[in-house]
Image (cartoon, grey):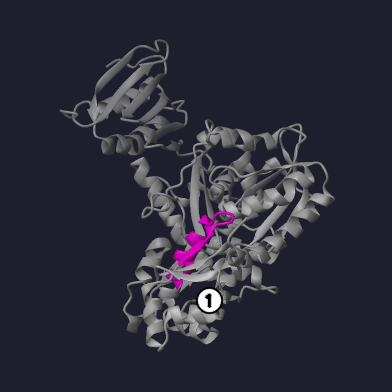
Amino acid sequence: MDIPEADLQLCIKNGSCIITMTVSGAAFIHLMRHIGVRGSLDGCGILGVLHKIDAEALISFGTLPWATIERLVHKVFIPSLHGAQSSAKSTVFSQHGIEKKYKEQDTSKEELLVVAIDIGTTYSGYAMSFKSQKYVIHTIFNRTDKNTSKVPTALLLQPDGIFHSLGNEALLHYNIIDEEELNKWMYFSRFKMKFHKTANLSRHATVAAANGKELLAKRLFAVFLEHVKNDAINQIKTNAACDVISPQDIKWVITVPAIWNDKAKQIMGEAAYEGGLASPRHSERVVIALEPEAAALYCRALHHISPLSQDSEDTTLAFEPETRYLLADFGGGTVDATVHEVQSDNRIRELHHATGGAWGGVYIDQNYVQLLERIFGEKMIEKFRSNHQRDWTDMMLTKFESAKRNIRPEGTLYLELTRPFYDFMNGEATSIKECINRFDNDDVRLVRGYLSLKYPEVKKLFEPVFSNICAHLKRLLENHPGVKFMILVGGFASSELLQTYLKTKFESSFGLRVIVPPHPSFSVMIGSVLFGHDPSVFIRKR
């Protein structure tokens, strides 16, 4: 076979996967000699070559299995490029919506993609996108509930302290452990608030598991991050049908509340190193993103991410040049609020440092617990909580969390009292119905096994938290006139009750629009991917 004088473009295709590489004629002949003399080339891949001066001339040389193509590219073809002094370019292919870039072996170690990990108080998740398509963002963490990409912020360690599972798997396994073994296992949930509640946080700070045993907070986050990292890499390999991605190919972004102090942020960075995301020597591979900034990037990019949504169009109005907006991030544990102004070059200037407090959704949970204590007795609730840890977790994390988010303005809240709780109360020589009758409140009733709270009682759960939030947002607006939009993001922002409350308080009195973007609970997670691609978009107040 004569060696072509011009460079050729090698095309390898397998369904939606394509590899293209500009190569010298000598390198192409080297490859043909390796595969062209070995009989039948059966499989699903199509191997061909496209001559640069004739874009329509595709010459097909047969078919190859995808595994063979992958082996050829990495073990035969790429080495041959260097031997033949080829002018090979970077290579890109995609499969099932995941894309991957290969580079020559002697190129720099620039990251190929960004993976952002959002550890929330109640739910956590990760998202990713490749540098060549930063707005094609993938969220694939939760494989047991197809309605969400997040999992409960839960971690389960075996009696010997070895990792067992996280997220839904941790919660499910914790619920089936034998009673006599339960106290040996370490189950952690909602552990993020430790970093906010502890004023003088140190590297020696600990977090208590459900059984009372303690673990260093930094170690706990390191274990969580390590196994999210492993899951992310496995998902990339699985969806891309090859085994070449490593942590060194990834820029990792970890989200933190803006109101965390520097010590807490530093410990989170150290936990990332301990979890194997990067090493201090390559600290540039780990980026700490402030949650409100990440959420702002999500909102600004909605016309790229979800171009057909009317909500996307409304939200992006807040990001026109010379527009001021207040962004409030309503998480499970904290509420962060900041004021930004969009510059003429589309960069975002911070006018007010993110500030806030511990006014997240979990504080409504605390008010609900106090209500249960008033109805059934403080000692009774504490006994159930201590002796039936997983049943208490199910009643609060699963049952109440769902009801809390879905309550409508002026609506009645129906809260499921689980069978274990019924059995416990009956075993204590009392009944749930008797306790509710003694409570003697017309707004609290037992309806077909559910604790029914009419709206006046619901307000008592929500209003103390809402009142603190409104007072803080009002101060920010008074100090920064000209704000045209208030953007609500975070998991708690999906509460219709919260949305209505804030619209009533602020839209007419301050002449602004309250906007909730599509999927507010994903705003930080997805926006932090965009932050990883371009953190310079923000001009922070000094």
175 to 403, vertically: above or below: below
Q: Quadrant of residue 348?
A: top right
Q: Is residue 90 magenta?
A: no
Q: Is residue 278 visible?
A: no
320 to 256, vertically: above or below: above
- Residue pointed to by mark 1: 372
Counting from the top left corner in percent of width and height, residue 18 is at 37, 29
Q: Is residue 124 visible?
A: yes
Counting from the top left corner in percent of width and height, residue 265 is at 65, 62
186 to 128, vertically: above or below: below
Q: Residue furthest bottom?
A: 429
Viewer-closest of 252 and 36: 252
Q: Is residue 406 magenta?
A: yes
Q: Amino acid at mark 1?
A: Leu
**From the viewer's perspective, is 176 left or right of 137?**
left
Q: Quadrant of residue 175?
A: bottom left
The residue located at (37%, 46%) in the rendering is: 237
Counting labels gives 1
Stretch of the chain drawn in magenta: 393-415
Q: Secondary structure at mark 1?
A: helix
**Main SS, magenta residues:** helix
Viewer-closest of 73 and 132: 132
**From the viewer's perspective, is 344 left or right of 172?**
right
Circle 1 packing at 10 Å, graded few (<14), some (14-19), many (20+), is: some
The residue located at (38%, 53%) in the rendering is: 145
Counting from the top left corner in percent of width and height, residue 224 is at 48, 63
Q: Where the N terminus falls, by quadrant?
A: top left
Viewer-closest of 532 and 491: 491
**From the viewer's perspective, is 509 left or right of 10?**
right
113 to 232, vertically: above or below: above
Counting from the top left corner in percent of width and height, residue 272 is at 55, 60
